[in-house]
Image: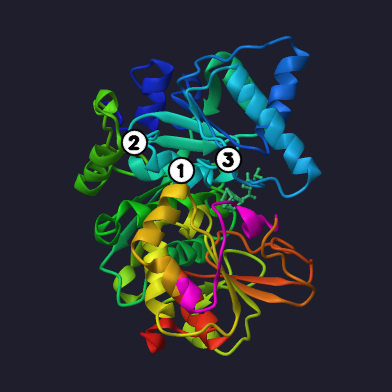
C-alpha cells in the first residue's frame, strides 16, 4: 500500500514535480517566493556580480524589504541599504518595499499578501519558517543559497522528517501562543527538532488567530527546525481572503494524510499551560513566570517578527493603559501598517501616556542592532525569539523571553510578574 505523506512532503513533491517524495529524499524544487533583506542579500548580490550574473530568475517572485538596520543606523548599514536599493531598482523587483514602506520581513510579507498555502518559500533569514503558519513550506537559507535562488529560481532540499505537535485543550487567561512555543522548545530543547519540519495541530492551534500562529512557526528554528507548519483552515482562509489580490486567490491546499509518517509525536495539554518566561540564555530555558517573579528588569522590548503585530500591541496596551512603566519600555510596531493601525486605534497614545518609546518599524534592538542596546549587567524582558549571550547588547546583559502580556505587565512593575496578577 502507498505510504501516506505529510503536508511538507506533499508541498516539496509538488515543487519538485514529483508524484511522491519521502523524508530523506534529495529534491530540486522551484521557489515560489524568495525573501530578501538588508543583511544577507547584499553578499548574495556580490556573489552574483562576481559571476557576471546581472538579472534575476523572476522579478515578481522576489520580495525585498530592508528591516534589520533601517533607517540606516551607521555608515556600514547605509552601504548595505544602498546596495540593496540599487539592486532592487536595477532589476525592477515588483515587490520592493523601500524605507518608508519597509517593515520587519516576517510581519510584512504575510500582511502584504506574499504568502500562499502550498508554496515553497525561502528567505535569507533564519526565521523565514514563520510563513509555515499559512500551510506553506518555508525555510531560512544563507547568502550562498540565496544567490543561487535569485539566479535560477530553484534550490535543492533534503525532504525533512516531521514531528507532530498536538496542542490539546484551550489556553487560559493571559496565556498566549508565545507561552505555547516556549513550552514546546523547553520540552524538546534547542536541537529537539534538528532539520525537522515541526507540524502543529490540535484544538489550541485551531483557536489561534493567524498572528498568534505566526508566533509559533516563527520560533521553529529555535528548536533547530527546518520549518514549522500549520494546515490551512477557515481562520487562514479568511486572512488570505483579506490580503491576497484577486489573481492570487487560487492557491493549492495540502494536508497531511492520516497515515503519514512522523519521526515522533508530542502532545501538550494547553489548558494547564501558564504564562512562561525563557530565562537567559536559551529559548529552551522556559519556566512559569509565577516562579520567577521579582527579578528587576531595566528594559522591556515589545516588537519583532515574533510579537510585533497589531494583536501583540493590543495585548501590551491592555496592560499598560492608565499605568506608568517602571522599566524603560520600547515598543516597535513591526510594519508601517501596524504602526498606522496602532495609531488609529489609540494604542500609540496609550504607550505615550505610559512613558514608552515608540520606534519606527525595524528589527532594531531584537538583535542588538540599535534603539535599545543593553549595557553591562542590564536585564530586558523581551517579546523576541532569542535570548542568547549578548543578543541585545553587552555580553553580560540578559534577555528574558515572554509574551507581550508578561512583558508589558513586568514593565509596569519594573520586575518580572505573572500577568494574571495585573489584569
Ligand atoms: C541577520 C539575520 C541573518 C538573522 C537571522 O537569520 O535570523 C537575524 O534576523 C536574527 O534574528 O538573528
Ligand atoms: S525581528 Fe529579530 S528575529 Fe526577526 S528577523 Fe529581525 S532580527 Fe531576526
Front residue of 313 and 234: 313
Magenta part of the protein: which range? 351-369
Picture coordinates of residue 245 (x, y %)?
A: 29, 30
**With respect to residue 24, does 367 lie above or below?**
below
- Earlier in the chain: of badge 2 and badge 1, it is 2
Picture coordinates of residue 167 (x, y %)?
A: 32, 60
Picture coordinates of residue 224 (x, y %)?
A: 57, 49
Give the residue at mark 3: 99
Give the residue at mark 2: 7
Crowd band around label 1 with a 10 angstrom C-alpha radius: few (<14), some (14–19), many (20+) = many
Residue 6 visible: no
Residue 376, picture quadrant: bottom right
At horizontal 60% and vertical 39% (from top left) the residue drawn is: 66
Report if the CB atoms under discs 2 and 1 are less than 8 Å apart: no
Which-is-in-front pick, marks 1 and 3? Answer: 3
Crowd band around label 3 with a 10 angstrom C-alpha radius: few (<14), some (14–19), many (20+) = some
Secondary structure of residue under mark 2: helix
Secondary structure of residue under mark 1: helix
Secondary structure of residue under mark 3: loop
Front residue of 192 and 312: 312
At horizontal 60% and vertical 81% (from top left) the residue drawn is: 327
Give the residue at mark 1: 108
| Horizontal arrangement in the rendering, residue 96 relative to residue 69 (left or right) | left
Amino acid at each position: 500500500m502507498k505510504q501516506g505523506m505529510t503536508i511538507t512532503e506533499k508541498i516539496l513533491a509538488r515543487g519538485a514535480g514529483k508524484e511522491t517524495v519521502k523524508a530523506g529524499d534529495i529534491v530540486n524544487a522551484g521557489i515560489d517566493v524568495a525573501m530578501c533583506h538588508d543583511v544577507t542579500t547584499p553578499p548574495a548580490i556580490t556573489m552574483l556580480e562576481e559571476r557576471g550574473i546581472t538579472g534575476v530568475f523572476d522579478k515578481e517572485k522576489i520580495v525585498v524589504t530592508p528591516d534589520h538596520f533601517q533607517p540606516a543606523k551607521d555608515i556600514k548599514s547605509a552601504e548595505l541599504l544602498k546596495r540593496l536599493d540599487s539592486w532592487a531598482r536595477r532589476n525592477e523587483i515588483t515587490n520592493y518595499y523601500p524605507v518608508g514602506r519597509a517593515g520587519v520581513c516576517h510581519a510584512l510579507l504575510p500582511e502584504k499578501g506574499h504568502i500562499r498555502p502550498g508554496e515553497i518559500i525561502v528567505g535569507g533569514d533564519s526565521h523565514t519558517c514563520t510563513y509555515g503558519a499559512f500551510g506553506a513550506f518555508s525555510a531560512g537559507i544563507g547568502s550562498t543559497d540565496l544567490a543561487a535562488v535569485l539566479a535560477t529560481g530553484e534550490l535543492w532540499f533534503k525532504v525533512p522528517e516531521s514531528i507532530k505537535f498536538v496542542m490539546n485543550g484551550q489556553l487560559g487567561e493571559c496565556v498566549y501562543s508565545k507561552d505555547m512555543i516556549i513550552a514546546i522548545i523547553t520540552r524538546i530543547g534547542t536541537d529537539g527538532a534538528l532539520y525537522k519540519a515541526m507540524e502543529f495541530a490540535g484544538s489550541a492551534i485551531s483557536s489561534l488567530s493567524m498572528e498568534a500562529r505566526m508566533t509559533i512557526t516563527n520560533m521553529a528554528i529555535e528548536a533547530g527546525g527546518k520549518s514549522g507548519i500549520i494546515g490551512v483552515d477557515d481562520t487562514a482562509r479568511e486572512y488570505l481572503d483579506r490580503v491576497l489580490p484577486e489573481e492570487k486567490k487560487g492557491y493549492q491546499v495540502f494536508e497531511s494524510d492520516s497515515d503519514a509518517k512522523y519521526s515522533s509525536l508530542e502532545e501538550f495539554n494547553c489548558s494547564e499551560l501558564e504564562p512562561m518566561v525563557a530565562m537567559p540564555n536559551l529559548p529552551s530555558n522556559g519556566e512559569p513566570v509565577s516562579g520567577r517573579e521579582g527579578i528587576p528588569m531595566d528594559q522591556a522590548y515589545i516588537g519583532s517578527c515574533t510579537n510585533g503585530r497589531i494583536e501583540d500591541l493590543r495585548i501590551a496596551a491592555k496592560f499598560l493603559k492608565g499605568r506608568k512603566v517602571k522599566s524603560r519600555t520600547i515598543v516597535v510596531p513591526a510594519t508601517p501598517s501596524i504602526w498606522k493601525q496602532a495609531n488609529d486605534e489609540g494604542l500609540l497614545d496609550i504607550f505615550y501616556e505610559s512613558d514608552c518609546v515608540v520606534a519606527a518599524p525595524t528589527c532594531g534592538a531584537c538583535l542588538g542592532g540599535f534603539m535599545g542596546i543593553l549595557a553591562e549587567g542590564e536585564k530586558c524582558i523581551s517579546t523576541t525569539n532569542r535570548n542568547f549571550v549578548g543578543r541585545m547588547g553587552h555580553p553580560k546583559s540578559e534577555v528574558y523571553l515572554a509574551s507581550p502580556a508578561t512583558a508589558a505587565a513586568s514593565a509596569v512593575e519594573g520586575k518580572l510578574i505573572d500577568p494574571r496578577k495585573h489584569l
